[in-house]
Amino acid sequence: MLDQYGHRIIARKVREEMLVDQARDTIFAEGKTITPARVIAGLSFGFWTTLIGIKYEDMNSKSLLWPNLEGIVFPHAPTGCGMPDIRKAFNSIRALRNRLSHHEALWKFHYND
């Protein structure tokens, strides 16, 4: 959380910040140049579903990500599609991905859109 000047209000890092640091450390340890694309690729899908969560939402100020950056991060979202819809879609994709990675049969998903 940041104050109105962009300075940290909470001194300790949150888990997501530590995961970004870990991705950067891994890239560095592999002897590669740290680039935004490599950091993004080094983060799990769970990271992204957490990042769009309500933990980062504040409807009353501009101190958190959502809804302040919604239009910038999701510029092609359909009209009327808000963060709750985006969260639902991300979580559905994550659930399907996780179930498939555990070798669950694809035909079991017939009840999902």
Image (cartoon, rainbow, N blue to C red):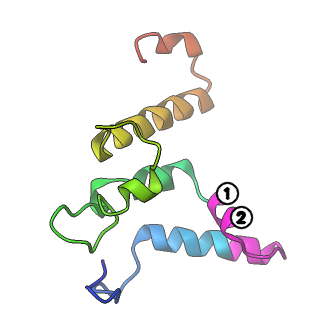
Give the side of residue 111 with respect to residue 61, left or right. Answer: right
The part of the image, by quadrant, that contains residue 60 is bottom left
In the rendered image, residue 56, in percent from the top left (x then y), is placed at: 31, 63
Main SS, magenta region, reads helix
Residue 62 or residue 15, whichever sits in front? 62
Q: Which residue is denoted by mark 2 in the rendering?
A: 38
Q: Is residue 54 above or below residue 85?
A: below
Q: Amino acid at mark 2?
A: Arg
Q: Is residue 64 above or below residue 77?
A: below
Secondary element at image label 1: helix
Q: Label 2 near label 1: C-beta < 8 Å?
A: yes
Residue sitting at x 26%, y 60%: 57
Residue 101 or residue 91, whichever sits in front? 91
- Label 1 – label 2 distance at C-alpha: 5 Å
Residue 71 or residue 4, whichever sits in front? 71
Q: Which residues are magenta?
A: 25-42
- Label 2 crowd bin: few (<14), some (14–19), many (20+), radius 10 Å: some
Mark number, residue 41: 1
In the rendered image, residue 84, in percent from the top left (x then y), is placed at: 28, 42
Q: Is residue 109 above or below residue 32?
A: above
Residue sitting at x 41%, y 79%: 13
Q: Is residue 102 above or below residue 14?
A: above
Give the side of residue 53 with respect to residue 40, left or right. Answer: left
Q: Amino acid at mark 1?
A: Ala
- Label 1 crowd bin: few (<14), some (14–19), many (20+), radius 10 Å: few
